[in-house]
Image (spheres, rainbow, N blue to C red):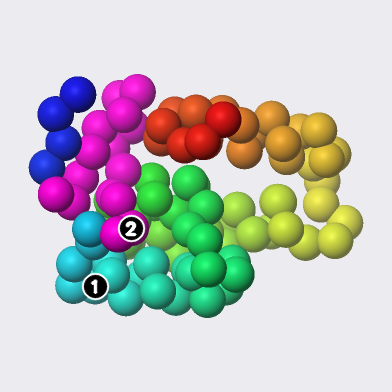
């Protein structure tokens, strides 16, 4: 698979590699890392491709997955996380 320094298409989903991001995306990833204890969740690597949708989609992600009384069960949240992680080529 051929990837340039910033973008990488894995499983037909364009992502931005946090360690190689520049400019506004580097700031975006810094903000996300602070919120999530030093890591960048896979969904934000996907959202960073189009920053116009990153904030509203990130808000929806936090609402569905991270609030206490989430409408998703723990199993459903884990299933979504596993699919996103696999799509971006994350660790098993």
Q: Identify the residue at horizontal 48%, vertical 46% (top origin).
A: 42
Q: Residue 55 appears at what percent x and percent y?
A: 45, 65
Is 41 placed above or below 59 here? above
Q: In terms of depth relative to the viewer, which is nearer, 85 or 63? A: 85
Q: Identify the residue at horizontal 44%, vertical 75% (top origin).
A: 31
Mark linked to residue 18: 2
Question: Mark 2 falls on what kind of element?
Answer: helix
Residue 87: quadrant of the picture? top left
Q: How far is disc 1 from disc 2 in space, using C-alphas?
A: 12 Å
Please give left or right for residue 89 compared with residue 74 in the image.
left
Q: Identify the residue at horizontal 31%, vertical 29% (top origin).
A: 10
Which sits earlier in the primary sequence, circle 1 or circle 2?
2
The C terminus lies in which quarter of the figure? top right
Residue 26: quadrant of the picture? bottom left
Q: Residue furthest front?
A: 91
Q: Residue 34 appears at what percent x and percent y?
A: 52, 76
Please give left or right for residue 78 compared with residue 22 in the image.
right
Is 31 placed above or below 69 here? below
The N terminus lies in which quarter of the figure? top left
- Of marks 1 and 2, the one in the foreground: 2
Disc 1: which residue: 24
Answer whether labels 1 and 2 touch (C-beta < 8 Å).
no
Please give left or right for residue 39 compared with residue 74 in the image.
left
Within 10 Å of the Cα at label 1, are there few (<14), some (14-19), or many (20+) other Cα atoms?
Answer: few
Is residue 24 magenta-colored?
no
Question: Mark 1 falls on what kind of element?
Answer: helix
Bounds of the magenta span? 5-19
């Amino acid at each position: 698979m051929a990837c340039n320094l910033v973008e990488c298409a894995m499983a037909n989903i364009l992502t931005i590699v946090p360690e190689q991001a520049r400019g506004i995306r580097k700031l975006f990833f810094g903000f996300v890392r602070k919120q999530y204890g030093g890591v960048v969740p896979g969904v934000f690597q996907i959202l960073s491709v189009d920053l116009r949708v990153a904030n509203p989609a990130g808000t929806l992600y936090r609402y569905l997955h991270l609030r206490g009384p989430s409408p998703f069960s723990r199993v459903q949240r884990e299933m979504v996380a596993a699919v996103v992680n696999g799509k971006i080529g994350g660790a098993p």
